[in-house]
Image (cartoon, helix red, strand yellow):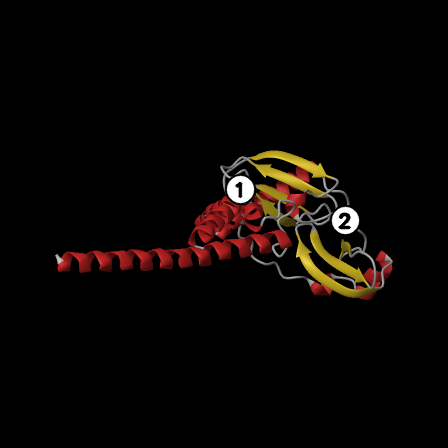
Amino acid sequence: MLRLSTQLHKWIALVVGLQVLFWVGGGLVMTAIPIETVRSEHRVAEQPPVPLALAALPPLDDIARQAGVAPAQAELRNTPRGPAWTLKPASGEPIVVSALTGRPFGPLSAVEASAFARRAYRGTAEVSGVAFLREAPEETGRTGPLWRVDFADREKTSFYLSPATAEVVTRRSGVWRLFDFFWRLHVMDWNDGEDFNHPLIIITTALTLSIVVSGFILLWIRLARDLKTLRAARRVARSE
């Protein structure tokens, strides 16, 4: 029975051992890197909030009529391109329009995207690249077009900007991509790293738990056997 238990313990450990290594190694990386660095929070310039000049803005009814939307929800905020309304209809996608005109903002040029990103960036690194992406990359977790502005810093930081308002909607860097790689290994979701309740990780975790429990049982059996052998040896030594 002990031999069978030992063999099962070894084979199960061999099957899940690589994933355990990923768990431990990934956990080390993810705990060693501050989450603020992963999110590039140290690269965000401090910008004091600017009060909205509400008296100078047309009424929401006029804005909605101009935009041709009957909003179920509406959000007003300041953006780098001026005050904007996000109008959310009862069905369909939200529409972002200027709070001054009720019309969508005009196209954002590469020069403007670079300037807005540089204004939002904290550091001395220069802009190393600007690109308009018709579809947001997977790493942003968003859909639709975005401007990407890259900076020549040591983390290879990228700011992704809304083409409508020039707001920085998300930030990515080499540190984030390293973290994301180990996160996907950690949760065993190599597609997008979003699902950490899938059957594979549940089964692997259960097998790993069985290794730990069986390991303690085997250790207890071996210790009990060694203790029994030691006691027998002592009795023999005393009898002599």
**Left or right of 159 on screen, residue 36:** left
**Left or right of 34 on screen, residue 161:** right
- Residue 209: image x %, image y %? 50, 57
Residue at image position (51%, 49%) is: 12
Q: How many marks?
A: 2
Q: In what element is the residue under mark 2? A: loop
Q: In what element is the residue under mark 1? A: helix
Q: Count neighbours of disc 1 (C-alpha within 10 A) and say few if under 14, some if 14 to 19, many if 20 or more.
A: some
Residue at image position (50%, 42%) is: 123
Q: In which quadrant is the N terminus drawn?
A: bottom left
Query: Which of the two residues, 88 or 8, is positioned nearer the viewer here?
Result: 8
Does residue 195 appear anywhere in the picture? no
Quadrant of the rendered image containing residue 73 = bottom right
Query: Which of the two residues, 144 or 179, is positioned nearer the viewer here?
Result: 179
Position of residue 31 relative to residue 75, above or below, is: above
- Residue 26: image x %, image y %? 49, 47
Q: Which mark is residue 49?
A: none
Q: Nearer the viewer, mark 1 or mark 2?
A: 1
Quadrant of the rendered image containing residue 145 = top right
The residue that mark 1 highlights is 178
- Residue 135: image x %, image y %? 74, 42
The residue that mark 2 highlights is 105
Residue at image position (68%, 59%) is: 77
Under mark 2, the amino acid is Phe
Under mark 1, the amino acid is Leu
**Left or right of 56 on screen, residue 21:** left
